[in-house]
Image (tube, grey):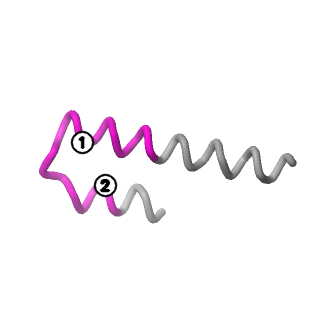
Amino acid sequence: MGVNLLTQTTVVIKFKLLFYMEIHDPHANFIKIIKFMS
């Protein structure tokens, strides 16, 4: 259960990062991809 929770938390953080990046710099698609893949 701990591993699943950690994975879900990581995914949520990544999506929040993508959303934050989209608001502040809609044209930084390469940054979003790097953040999501890393």
Whether pointer 2 and pointer 1 mark residues with C-beta atoms closer than 8 Å, the reply is yes
Q: Who's the residue at 60% across and 47% down the image?
A: 10
Determine the image quadrant of residue 24.
top left
Q: Is residue 33 above or below residue 2?
A: below
The disc label shown at residue 32, or none: 2
Between disc 2 and disc 1, whose residue precedes?
Answer: 1
Q: In this view, does 30 lie above or below 27?
A: below
Determine the image quadrant of residue 23.
top left
Instruction: Give the Cα separation between the discs numbered 2 and 1.
Output: 8 Å
Q: Is residue 14 above or below residue 34?
A: above
The percent position of residue 2, horizontal first and vertical second, equals 84, 46
Residue 15 as seen in the image, left or right of residue 6: left
User: Range of the magenta residues?
Assistant: 15-33
Q: How crowded is mark 2: few (under 14 residues within 10 Å), some or many (20 or more)?
A: many
Q: Who's the residue at 87% across and 48% down the image?
A: 1
Residue 12 as seen in the image, left or right of residue 19: right
The disc label shown at residue 22, or none: 1
Q: Who's the residue at 28% across and 56% down the image?
A: 31
